[in-house]
């Protein structure tokens, strides 16, 4: 006999094994839950029910292995072990479809789900499953779900959604930024304002041809010449994709003699002519 047969977790339950046989002495009893033996041997057993106690119970008198008819104990309990899972479970790339699923163990089953992103409720999300059809970097963040079944609630640990995307806003800068004179030192730098994962490799181009010796995000021309003039751009890559910058025109100007220097130079020439003329 089971009293009661349906109970909320934490409430008291009494199991009693009855027999029509005449028993002498103090017989031991054998108890089973779902066919597995239980450790207690008394004719009655009282306990506070937990979710692990649900199942089908039978008993028998030790030495008389005729089992009783089975009785079922139904334990009602709030959601437990609530988790958020993500599909696909590995790399999540921008513009791909991603599904988040909230799962929980509960009796009766969960009937209410509340989703949160960075601790703010997502009011438009309903049910245990939500699909983001074309994910963007704005969807990155920590997601949790709250489950409820009328007995209680449970909230999942946060699940981090990391959205990967190729480099964005790639550009080339030149230092110094002003006039570039032949013979001076010039540094070109390739930068990207945003990439996940960070940029891993750079390719440089001059007038649409690859500059094979150049590697890394910056390159310095120690003594620039007229032959170095032209349009430069770079491509930044991070394993997810590559992005090219707009071309940057490098204008190299010749060294020149100023008017005052030219006047002095002419005076010196005339002096030398008068001396050696």
Image (tube, rainbow, N blue to C red):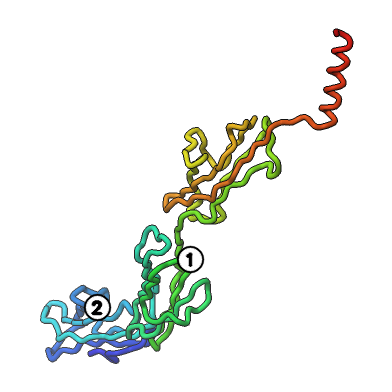
Residue 163 location (% of width, % of height): 45, 61
- Quadrant of the rendered image containing residue 49: bottom left
Viewer-side residue, 185 vs 225: 225
Q: Could you tell whether 247 is left or right of 135 in the image?
A: right
* Position above or below: 93 against 28: above
Asked whether residue 33 appears in the rendered view, the answer is: yes
Dot 1, crowdedness within 10 Å: few (<14), some or many (≥20)? some
Q: Could you tell whether 244 is left or right of 85 in the image?
A: right
- Quadrant of the rendered image containing residue 29: bottom left
- Label 2 vs 1, first from the N-terminus: 2
Q: Residue at x 15, y 86 (%)?
A: 69
Dot 2, crowdedness within 10 Å: few (<14), some or many (≥20)? some
Residue of label 2: 41
Residue 77 location (% of width, % of height): 36, 83
Check the image and name the residue furthest to the front: 277
Residue 274 location (% of width, % of height): 88, 12
- Quadrant of the rendered image containing residue 59: bottom left
Q: Which quarter of the rendered picture does the C terminus lie within?
A: top right
* Position above or below: 201 against 264: below
Q: Could you tell whether 12 is left or right of 183 in the image?
A: left
* Position above or below: 29 against 98: below
Viewer-side residue, 106 vs 124: 124
- How far apart in space, not on screen, are marks 2 and 1 (Cα)? 56 Å
Viewer-side residue, 64 vs 200: 200
Q: Residue at x 45, y 64 (%)?
A: 161
Q: Which quarter of the rendered picture does the N terminus lie within?
A: bottom left
Q: Residue at x 55, y 42 (%)?
A: 232
Disc 2 element: loop
Disc 1 element: loop
Asked whether residue 48 appears in the rendered view, the answer is: no
Disc nearest the viewer among 2 and 1: 1
Residue of label 1: 140
């Amino acid at each position: 006999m089971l009293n009661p047969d349906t109970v909320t977790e934490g409430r008291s339950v009494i199991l009693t094994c009855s027999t029509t046989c005449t028993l002498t002495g103090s017989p031991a009893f054998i108890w089973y839950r779902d066919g597995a033996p239980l450790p207690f041997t008394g004719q009655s057993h009282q306990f506070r029910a937990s979710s692990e106690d649900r199942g089908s119970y039978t008993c028998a008198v030790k030495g008389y292995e005729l089992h009783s008819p089975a009785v079922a104990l139904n334990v009602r309990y709030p959601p437990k072990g609530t988790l958020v899972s993500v599909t696909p479970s590995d790399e999540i790339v921008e513009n791909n479809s991603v599904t988040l699923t909230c799962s929980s163990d509960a009796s009766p089953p969960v009937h209410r789900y509340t989703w949160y992103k960075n601790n703010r409720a997502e009011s438009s999300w309903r049910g245990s499953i939500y699909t983001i059809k074309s994910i963007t970097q704005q969807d990155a963040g920590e997601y949790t779900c709250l489950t409820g079944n009328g007995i209680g609630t449970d909230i999942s640990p946060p699940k981090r959604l990391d959205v990967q995307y190729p480099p964005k806003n790639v550009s080339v800068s030149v230092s110094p930024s002003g006039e570039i004179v032949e013979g001076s030192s010039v540094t070109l730098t390739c930068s990207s304002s945003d990439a996940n994962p960070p940029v891993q490799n750079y390719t440089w181009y001059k007038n649409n041809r690859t500059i094979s010796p150049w590697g890394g995000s910056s390159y310095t021309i120690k003594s620039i010449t007229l032959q170095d003039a032209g349009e430069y751009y770079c491509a930044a890559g991070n394993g997810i994709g590559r992005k090219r910058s707009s071309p940057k025109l490098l204008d190299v100007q010749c060294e020149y003699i100023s008017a005052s220097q030219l006047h002095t130079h002419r005076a010196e020439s005339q002096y030398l002519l008068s001396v050696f003329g």
